Amino acid sequence: MGTVKTGIRRRARLLKEALSAPAPRAVEPAAPGGRRPPRRTVPLEVAVPTAPRLVDSPVFVLTPVRAGSTLLRMLLNSHSRVRAPHELHLRSVEVDLAPDFSGRALRALDLDKAELEHVLWDRVLHLELERSGKDVVVDKTPGNVWAWQRLEHAWPRARFLFLRRHPRAIIDSLDRRKGNTATTAENERNVLKYLGPLEEARRSLDPALTHTVRYEDLTADPAAVTRSVTDWLGLDWEPGMLDYGSHADAHGPLLPNLGDRSEKILSGRVQPAPAPLGLDGLSPRVREVAEAWGYGGSLAA
């Protein structure tokens, strides 16, 4: 009988808490540059200190879809010190705190939902390094373009590798994608969703923590481009990176929605990109970005 009464009292207390106005929560002053960045677009009102990280300086590729990020990750993953797994989609890995106990308990430890997610993401990256025996981790998920602010907050020493490709080539690749049912105009709008955040990141991130490569250059001279990346990372360049097909077991399975699985990738060797494309027919915004990226005869910004 005592157990039943205890249960009733507990449920009554929880119901009272649920119906009453929430207690005010302390809000730390916003960091320079505004509030802590969100996972998507919803501001986070409460900030907590950043917990220690197991991975101090991960590398995040910022790129649109269909821009050659799988090829880049295969080449980088073939380096003896670089672990570049399939797309991790960290921004969609979430935690759920029960409102009665766990949320309050963890806030008392200076941990909120967002920071717990950061700790979890950090552990995922660290596991990849532990399992591979390497010490530099690269995540090439295209969705990182919508989370770069939060990634920068989560890892103040994170490095960002921009991968560019002619926007028309990206749109054409989407048009040719197996199972594509979208029109060219719809695919162009899809590409635009990436280009805006990419340009914002380019203007905002510390140049000392960024490096930019172009897909066309990567396919034309993979040795020079991969050497530029390893130099930026402070690593020795390894010729074996170019023979990524000989490291197939290390790359893991090629699965849907986790990277490219085309015949070009499966060939195990770098193949030339198609001939340079023009800008005719592109919308003004896409054309503007293409010119800023050095396509169409304009100098790169």
Image (cartoon, grey):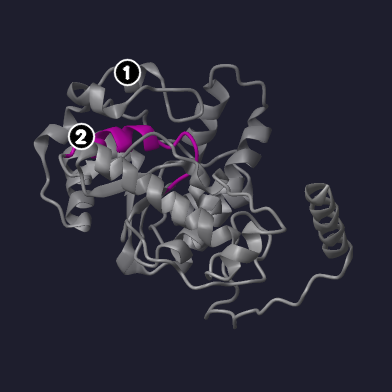
Q: Which residue is mark 2?
A: 78
Q: Is residue 102 left or right of residue 211?
A: right
Q: In 3D space, how far apart are the residues under numbered discs 1 and 2 (Cα atoms)?
A: 15 Å
Residue at coordinates 33% horizontally, 43% vertically from top-left?
A: 127
- Disc 2, SS: loop
Where residue 142 sits in the image (x, y, percent)? 48, 42
Pick the quarter of the image with the C terminus: bottom left
In the image, the segment drawn in magenta is 62-79
Give the class, few, some or many, for how many residues have Cα within 10 Å of label 1's Cα (few <14, many ≥20).
few
Residue at coordinates 46% horizontally, 30% vertically from top-left?
A: 258
Residue 51 at least partly seen: yes
Taking 160 as reference, is 215 above or below it?
above
Tell me where residue 73 sits by quadrant.
Answer: top left
- Disc 1, SS: helix
Taking 90 as reference, is 68 above or below it?
above
Give the class, few, some or many, for how many residues have Cα within 10 Å of label 2's Cα (few <14, many ≥20).
many
The answer to if 206 sits in the magenta stretch is: no
Where residue 162 sits in the image (x, y, percent)? 38, 51
Residue at coordinates 64% horizontally, 60% vertically from top-left?
A: 103
Mark 1: amino acid? Leu
Image marks 1 and 2: residues in contact by CB distance under 8 Å = no
Q: Is residue 27 left or right of residue 202?
A: right
Q: Which residue is mark 1?
A: 266
Where residue 263 sits in the image (x, y, percent)? 37, 16
| Sequence-earlier tag: 1 or 2 | 2
